[in-house]
Image: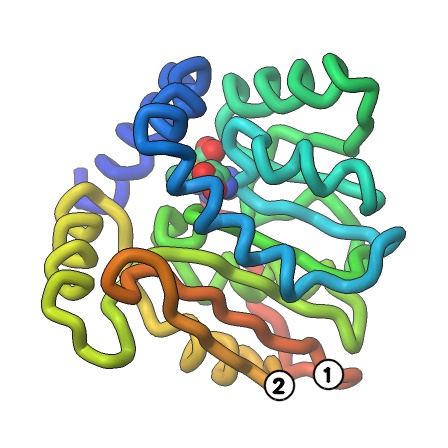
Amino acid sequence: MDKATIQYHFWRRVYDWFAPFYDAVDWFTGNTAHRLRRRALEHLPPPGSRLLEVGFGSGKLHGELARPYAMAGVDRAPGMVRLTRRRLASVGLASDLKCGSVYAIPWPDTTFDAVLSTFAFSAFPDADAALNEMIRVVKAGGRIVIVDAGPAMDGNPVAAWLARLWDLLGDTMRDEVRLMESCGLQEVTRQDYGPFGSVHVVVGVRPEIIMAIDSKPKP
Ligand SMILES: C[S@@+](CC[C@H](N)C(=O)[O-])C[C@H]1O[C@@H](n2cnc3c(N)ncnc32)[C@H](O)[C@@H]1O
C-alpha cells in the first residue's frame, strides 16, 4: 500500500470517528481555528448567493453561512455530515448537505456563485483533480476561496516548521496560487495571516472560458 492510500484510509476514519470531538479541540484552543477560518467570509459574494463548502467538517462556519447564503456542502465523513445536519437543524437553518468526495462533487456544472474550503484542501492528495472539480461547479465570474495552512510567503521559520509538521501528519502543503493559475483561474490573490503567517487565504475567479477540465473520479 502506498503512502497516499494509507493516508486516505487513516484520515477517512479519523474524521468520521473524531467528528463529535472536533469542536472541543477548537474550544480548548480558544476558538483559534474558527477565527482563522472566518477570514474566508471577507471574500464571499453578496448575501443570497449560492455557495458550496467543500470539506465543511463539524459545520461551524457552515452554520454561520447558512443564514445569509443559499448553502450546500459536501464532506466525505458521514460523522461530519450528521453533526452539521444536527447543528443546522437545532437553529432552524437549512443547507443541501451531501456525503461525497471533492473528486466527484455531486452537483452539475456551474451551479454555484462561489466554492469555499477551509483547512481541507491540504487533506486532498490530488490537488489538481480537487481544484478542477471545484472550478467545474462554479459559475463564470464566480470565486474559489481556499483557507489553509502552509509556509509563509515571507519565509518565517516558525511557519515553515509548522508546515513541515502538518506534512508529517499527512497533509500536503502546496502553492495554491500557482495551482489556481495553472487551472485557468484569474485575479488570483493570496494573503498570509494567523500565527507567524502560517495560514493563508487564496482566492481565484473563474473566467468565461476555461481550459479542459480533468475531473476523473478518485476515492
Ligand atoms: C481538517 S477538516 C476541516 C474541516 C473544516 N472545514 C474546518 O475548517 O475545520 C477536513 C475535512 O475535509 C473532509 N475531507 C477530507 N477528504 C475529503 C474528500 N476527498 N472529499 C470531501 N471531503 C473531504 C474531512 O472529512 C474533514 O471533514
Provide residue 52's location: percent of width, then percent of height: 70, 48
**Residue toward you, 157 or 111:** 157
Image quarter for residue 92? top right
Question: Disc number at residue 186?
Answer: 2
Task: Say which element carries label 2.
Answer: strand
x, y percent for residue 165 = 14, 49
Q: Residue 176's mark?
A: none
> Mark 2 touching mark 1, by CB under 8 A?
yes
Residue at point 62%, 23% (across, down) = 84
Q: Nearer the viewer, residue 160 or 77?
A: 160
Query: Callout 1: few (<14), some (14-19), or many (20+) C-alpha neighbours within 10 Å?
Result: some
- Say which residue appears at 42% left-offset and 61% top-offset: 127
Q: Residue 207 bears which disc, if any?
A: 1
Q: Quadrant of the C terminus?
A: top left
> Where residue 75 sits: x, y (%)?
56, 35
Say which element carries label 1: loop
Q: Pick whichever of labels 2 and 1 is earlier in the sequence.
A: 2
Alpha-carbon span between mark 2 and mark 1: 7 Å
Other-residue count near label 2 (Cα within 10 Å), few / some / many at <14 / 14–19 / ≥20: some
Q: Amino acid at mark 2?
A: Gln
State the image quarter where residue 173 is shown.
bottom left
